[in-house]
Image (cartoon, rainbow, N blue to C red):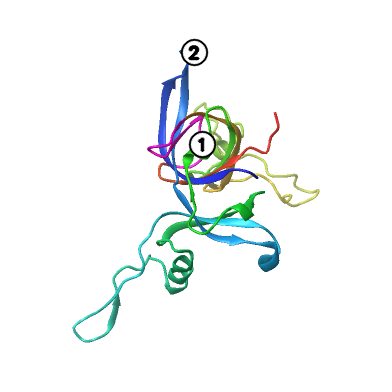
Amino acid sequence: MKKAILATKVGMTQIFNSDGVLVPVTVLEAGPCVVTQVKTMENDGYEAVQVGFGERKEKSVNKDANGKKEVRRRHGINKAEKGHFAKAGVSGKRYVKEFRFENASEYKLADEIKADIFAEGDKVDATAISKGKGFQGAVKRLGQHRGPMAHGSKFHRHQGSNGACSSPSRVFKGKGMPGHMGAVKVTIQNLEVVRVDAEKNLLLVKGAVPGPKKALVTIRETVKTV
């Protein structure tokens, strides 16, 4: 891996390219990310770069009138995280992720990784947690066929037969059934970077990217060669 960055999904829009063709794009606020740790072969057994993205304040503890401690901000960084970020010389970060760059040794603590590491025309892979759909039936979740919609059918969007009765007298493992849909890690490969706005830290990627708005998206240089 040569290039990667963390981003948040802003939303979708459409732009005209240089040929006057209307292109649907996903707007991503990419970076700036800062290097919080550099892992080396001598210390860790492999080379990688740990980056942080998004500001996050530390937990604040105040005392009430009786002198008891009361936590005001519960979702901030803890003491261990505070020490880790202080060692790197950076402020607290909301997201921390590790990338195994081929040139990891060239990075130093507190170095910034911005959107301009990508250029127009680059191919990237986008990874994020997809939108959660809750509990869904087999028709929506798995694309199974529905039954007749006539009044006397009494079988419209039910799953249907799950298996034979006498042999093997059970339902096979892996049988598609109703259940929780979405909220899983999804990677869309070989997306094209249409435009890069280095001043506003924006990447415009052709097509759709997984996840809702404000979702954390990992943008990597594509693994595909074509």
Q: Which residue is mark 2?
A: 19
Residue type at mark 1 is Val
Q: Which mark is residue 209?
A: 1
| Separation of residues labelled 2 and 1 (CA atoms) | 24 Å
- Whether residues under marks 2 and 1 lie with C-beta atoms below 8 angstroms apart, the answer is no
Per the rendered image, the range of residues in magenta is 196-212
In the image, residue 45 sits, relative to residue 169, either above or below, namely below
The extreme top residue here reads 20
Type of amino acid at the residue the image marks with label 2: Asp
Image quarter where the N terminus lies is: top right
**x and y, in percent, of residue 172 in the image:** 74, 49
Q: Residues within 10 Å of mark 1 (few under 14, many from 20)?
A: many
Q: Residue at x 74, y 52 (%)?
A: 170
* Residue furthest left in the image: 65
- Is 176 magenta? The answer is no
Provide the secondary structure element on which disc 1 rests.
loop
Relative to 207, is 13 on the left or the right? left
Name the front one of labels 2 and 1: 2
The answer to whether any part of residue 6 appears in the image is yes
Query: 137 or 214: which is nearer to us?
Result: 214
**Quarter of the image that includes the C terminus:** top right
In which quarter of the view is residue 139 placed?
top right
Q: Earlier in the sequence, mark 2 or mark 1?
A: 2
Relative horizontal placement of residue 26, taking residue 1 as reference (left or right): left
